[in-house]
Image: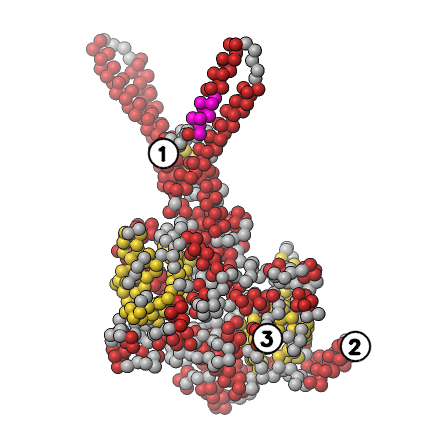
Amino acid sequence: MAPLLELKQLKKYYPIYGGVFKRRVASVRAVDDVSISVDRGECFGLVGESGCGKTTLGKTLLRLLKPDAGSIYFGVPAEVTAQINQLSRSNPRSPVLRRLRRKYDIATYAGMDLRRLRRRMQIVYQDPTTSLDPRMLVKDVVGESLYAQGIASGEEAKKMVMEILERVGMSERALFRFPHEFSGGQRQRIAIARALVSHPEFVILDEPTSAVDVSVRAQLLNLFQDLQKEFGLTYMFISHDLSIVECISDRVGIMYLGKIVEYSTTEQIFHTPLHPYSQALIASVPIPDPTRRKERAPLTGEVPSPVNPPLGCRFHPRCPLAMDICKKKEPMLLDSGQGHFVACYAVSQSTG
Amino acid sequence: MSKGSIVEVQDLEVKFYTYAGVVEALDGVNLFVREGEILGLVGETGSGKSVTSLSIMRLVPPPGVIEGGRIILRDSGKQQNTLTMKEDTIRKVRGKDISMIFQEPRAYLNPVYSVENQIAEVMLVHRREELLENSIASVQKRLIDGRKAVLEKEKARLDKENPQGEKEKVELAKRRQTIEKRLAALTAKQPSNNEIASYRRLLKAERYWSTENARQFQKKKAKLERLRATLEKQKTELEGKKGTEKQMVSINKQKQSVMAWLGQCNRQYAELMQVEPTEYKPGLGTRIPGAVRVRAMRFPARFNRKRQFQNEVRKEVVKVLKSVEIPDPERVARMYPHELSGGMAQRVVIAMALACNPRMLIADEPTTNLDVTVQAQILNLVKTLKKNLGSAILYITHDLGVVAQSCDRVAVMYAGNVVETADVFETFSNPLHPYTRALLDSIPRPGEPFKSIPGIVPSLVNPLKGCRFHDRCSYATEQCLSVKPKFIEVKPDHYVSCHLYGGS
């Protein structure tokens, strides 16, 4: 089965301007050489500490931000992917490849192409209080994409808005109210309705539950799972809360300083994490069980600045297994068996 | 109910008088924190966790009002109700006996002052005397060391001398004796009362001299100088006068009174000049506002007392930064808050809270904004601090994982009430209150569907009568709708407020 979404060496650098002429003096390497694929119908969890580029990656692959390099293939037929792969290996300069990329690589899209794409990919943001326009009625907040995309208008649009609101657990009374009249959980439901009203294939959930309370969190997570089944959605679930990711994702990617350091199925990531960072991250999660206390913090220090990431493997200053090679050369993301990708010399050494 | 407790909160009621109505934020909260334990205070947003902690510090912001209850602070057998304390007294408690760590370290730190400045502020308020004594002691030590070095050098010189004559030998022995006597006297020397007093004066002056005082000082000085000039003039005039014997008697009398006035004037002038304020220039290296130069002290001039005091404070700051495991504390002390990372800023805030060795520390969601790896570090730090200091910690959080990992006891809050308090193992293995159970069930577990608590956290403007949880509780009975359950001890050290367990 062809993956729904495929990223190839995606890069997004934020420029830092300085000096007298405000020249570009440095860049924040928010997303640096990320290649992953997301299968149709799965929930891909993206985990990492704050500032590691999770949100930037999400926004870049939705083309809310323009990537600096790399390609994004979304919903491309399998044979086309195969052809692109084959051509970029054998003849990266061929005009056929260029034409194919123009057609399928959404990193090259602009104008109407992008606009059409928006219908198929959506996002739910972290904080519904700031992501909903306070001066728009709920019916307009939710219906806006219908009008903008020309999907429906008038009575038909209203019917669609009603349907989706009902589906996310809001009543008809919500239509003519403003976002501030709702509680945090309800606002997040409105944001979900807005994302789903145009029936997208792919939805990015960018920390959708970190602004709500524990009791509401479970309601929302259940809703996400139900909607996924009902609409056949593919999710990318961005979060720093590993306990939720473990429960909701099929596969998980772990990011550190703009790089994916490990990705595999949820089970493998949480039971046999290979990368030392993943191991530390998972061990840092406080277990809600007083009989299983941990006495030591697994990791010292903090995430370095992405403006000047450490040379070689970006994790080496904090890594307990760091070797000489880690300081010099960046490890590649390699398959260590059964689709378990890790970027670590220590792992590739031990597995041969 | 509260053996060995440091702080005990009894039936605390807090209301917020807002335009939307009266928010009954706390409705009879009962809890206590024992010496050397971490009490986790858990609850959802708006359950009153933070208001409880602010009430303990008596920092509830208006329009909040503490309507009733008692907060008892126990200090070596003494009991005090902080709610009835005078503002002056509670200010001595805040930061010293009870101190607080806030959720957002960057919002809490002042961006325009360096870290050491901000930590020193707490110390200068609560530990002035102690720091002062340390400072005197270290000046004394340096003084004595200096003199000792001189004497020892002299002694060494004498040892080398090899006199020939009998007379010279006796002379040398005498000199040696005197030096040895002096050395012995030196080591025994304590700071004299005079020295301590002059130091006190310095600190007092530092505290109260301001630019206003400096102006007054100038005025007074000018006045005294004018007065002295006139008196001197009168004196010379009187001295020049000559007359009959009778006249001379009256002249002498006048002269005497003028002399007395002059003496008084001179004395006042000398007193005034003892504490001469230099001009206060903000931002020009002056760290303590209203810095003064004190004259007529018995220390030699090369010991700058102010600097000495600053060094003493700085030493303490570095010590406290070291205690929160900050690498390179000397460098971090001179940094400004924007140069610190999130975890480091939180450590600085913790250092500030620990600057006066508080008996109780309130930590209001200290790790909510931090990453998991840093959170694990901070949690470990809190645990080591508990071990080392033996102070009580009230740890406010909504993360049950954090509670399980670090707390000794747990208090669960819901809508302005503490609904259950128990040992952490008891809470997780045998929760009694339906809300506690629901909360524990809402922890996501892989492979199981997410369990939520039906309904939403109620508004506290018109709170429900009876048990405030009854509309979301599946065990609710008639009684729950009207009667508020009492907070009772159902098992040793396990308190619940629910009708199911005889709270009626």
Look at the image and tell me whether residue A17 can be seen. no
Residue located 55% across and 50% down the image: B328
Can you give x and y, in whole percent of width and height, for residue B492 in the image?
A: 31, 67
According to the picture, the residue beneath numbered tag 2 turns out to be A91
Q: On what subunit does the disc labeled 2 rest?
A: A
Q: Point out the image quarter for the N terminus of chain A.
A: bottom right
Q: On what subunit does the disc labeled 3 rest?
A: A
A42 is within the stretch colored magenta: no
Q: Residues within 10 Å of mark 3 (few under 14, many from 20)?
A: some
Residue located 52% across and 61% down the image: A297
Q: Is residue B440 above or below residue B271?
A: below
Q: Secondary structure at mark 1?
A: helix
User: Bounds of the magenta span?
Assistant: B179-187
Can you give x and y, in whole percent of width and height, for residue B26 in the image?
A: 31, 67
Of mark 2 and mark 3, the one earlier in the sequence is: 2
User: Label 1 is placed on what type of residue?
Assistant: Ala
- Distance from the alpha carbon under mark 1 to that under mark 2: 89 Å
Q: Quadrant of residue B213?
A: top left
Q: Secondary structure at mark 2?
A: loop
Q: Point out the image quarter for the C terminus of chain A.
A: bottom right
